[in-house]
Image (cartoon, coloured by chain):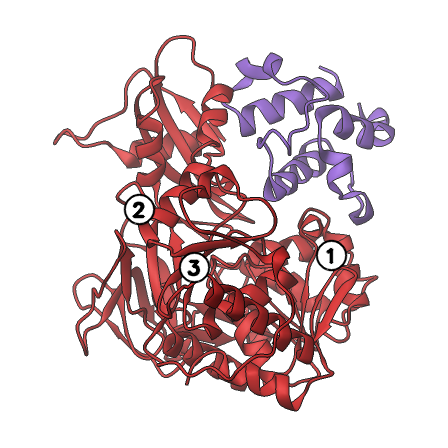
Chain colours: A red, B purple
Amino acid sequence: MNLVTGIEHQCITNPFAIAIRENQRAINYQQLSLKIGAVVQLLQRAGIPSGSRIGLAMDRGLDTVCVLLGVLSAGCCYVPLDIKSPAKRRQFIVNDAGVAAVIGCGECPHEYQNFGWLDYNSVSDHELDVSIHQADQLATILYTSGSTGSPKGVALSHRAIHAFSHWAQQLVNLRNTDCIASLTPLFFDLSTFDIFASLSTGACIDFVPAQLTMAPSQLSAWLSQHRISGFYTVPSVLGFLALKGNLEKTPLQDLRFVLFAGEVFPTRLLKTLINYLPNTEFYNFYGPTETNVCVYWRVEPDTLLEQTPIPIGHPACGNQLKIAENTGELLVKGPTVMSGYWSKKTLHAVLADQQWYATGDQVSINEKGEYCYHGRLDRMLKCSGYRVEPAEIEHVLLSLPEVTNCAVIGVSDETAGQRPAAAVVLQPETTIQALRRKLSQQLPHYMIPSRWKILPALPLLKNGKTDYLSISNLFVTAK
Amino acid sequence: MNTQQRISQYIAKEFLQDEGSVSEIPEDLNLLDAGIVDSLGLLRIVAFLEEEMQVVIEPEDMIPENLKSIHAITHLISPQSAEVS
């Protein structure tokens, strides 16, 4: 089974239903198939062989979904490029992925000059031939923060993404009358639900205008007006809605289900949200990009206690779970697990057959048999659902001449989960604002530390290693 | 300390490094464009205004336009802060 088969089927059986909406634009499934066909033709004319990686230099939206599906239909693998991240980072990714081409709209930006540029604006509609691909073929490489100082590519096959989207369809009983709000960037694995689960059911994807994330009452009005029936997002967006979404005056009657993942949803905020939306089903999804969703919990509103974090729940998508005896680390094996890490233009299959993927997350099982999350075994942070490796931020900070030494830790934040905070030893006359400016040329916004401490020297442990605990305490007491 | 100074001081302390950098933030600097505050930062600012400055931010007022700069924030809460200060 490959990811486009189900969508191609909808294009034939459900041609006049609306497939995608974005602001004032909308296309039906028949139009979608012609756009997908156009992208297949664009790639074929450029002589791009099946199996190539293709960079997507486009923000989430209607056109981008057409391009992404065209790339898959042509037997290629899509590599999302976060257009809001710095050029240097995007250049690293296209290079590391070894893309055969980058697709975008209009003129080629300078950072992609050395890679084949294909302009989506130049295509015209074209009939789509049914595609035949192997399920093991890679569908996408999603780059996340890497602990070695550079972004890390997680390679996912058609089979892995299909296993998740098919499972999710069944879970929420997705129908062709559903309208799914989409807010997640493509480089984030949550987007696979919006695109593949929705479109292969014949449902409609409606793109949430980005500016609404900073205006929660406008977001709730939009969800209501657009009669959204399903929404998969991060707790920070939902927390925002719960606190300032004006939900008492904006009943979201069409909203059948809300799925959330990426970070721990503070129980107090979840309770507030559920009080406003008593008829909506809520699900907590858990899983690193490497496994997509491997554990899930259907929220039981009556069991929620403000001081107790909600469980992550039960095995999802046919995965098997196991807890490592010594460390309490969650191990996962099953259909949604990645094919491996992609780096230096090659797939590195990190797991042999029948091997378990170690998540780095510490878990336990409660008296009801539900898995519960307790935190990371390493230093990784989750910031508004984004995965952030402090070592990657430290690596960039240390490359700046103004920084003599630094240590990055996470500070907890009720709505964002965690935020990176930096303790730095600086050359004289350096300002934090100047540092922030320089960092923003190399790191995406969610990796820029939100708190800073300038120290004469970093505190060290007796063995000479950085004393991260003391540094964390500096930020706690400073508040 | 007046309302605007308190807000400047909070933003300098919370989002930059310490109170020493207050003078670095011009009152009309767009904090969102400058990358100092993001959407979650806005929520932190609102929490500060509501908890520390005893004002109420109505959901309708919670839009980037009203919270984008120290000047905008001061203007937004001025009818309420005049009563409590």
Query: Pointer 2 indicates a residue of which chain?
Result: A
Left or right placement of residue A31 versus residue A232 in this view: right
Where residue A337 sits, quadrant-wise, is bottom left
**For the residues carrying marks 1 and 2, which lies nearer the camera in this image?**
1
* CA distance for labels 1 and 2: 34 Å
Q: Are marks 3 and 1 in contact (CB under 8 Å)?
A: no
Q: Which secondary structure lies at badge 3?
A: strand
Q: Are marks 1 and 2 on the same chain?
A: yes
Q: Quadrant of the N terminus of chain B?
A: top right
**Which residue is pictured at 68% across the width and 59% down the height?**
A208
Please report the residue visible at 18 percent of the width from the left and 77 percent of the height from the top. A353
> Which residue is disc 1 drawn over?
A219
Q: CB under 8 Å between callouts 3 and 2?
A: no
For the residue carrying disc 2, how many other residues have a C-alpha within 10 Å: few (<14), some (14-19), or many (20+)? some
Q: Position of residue B34 (x, y in %)?
A: 60, 29
Q: How many marks on residues?
A: 3
Type of amino acid at the residue the image marks with label 2: Arg
When the figure is inspected, residue A111 is found, relative to residue A272, above or below; the finding is: above
Residues packed near mark 3 inside 10 Å, few (<14), some (14 to 19) or many (20 plus): many
Judging from the image, what secondary structure is the residue with disc 2 in?
Answer: loop
Q: Chain of mark 3?
A: A
- The amino acid at mark 3 is Ile
When the figure is inspected, residue A80 is found, relative to residue A331, above or below; the finding is above
Q: Is residue B29 visible?
A: yes
**Residue on which disc 3 sits:** A54
Q: Is A329 placed above or below B21 here?
A: below
Seen at 48% across and 74% down, the residue is A73
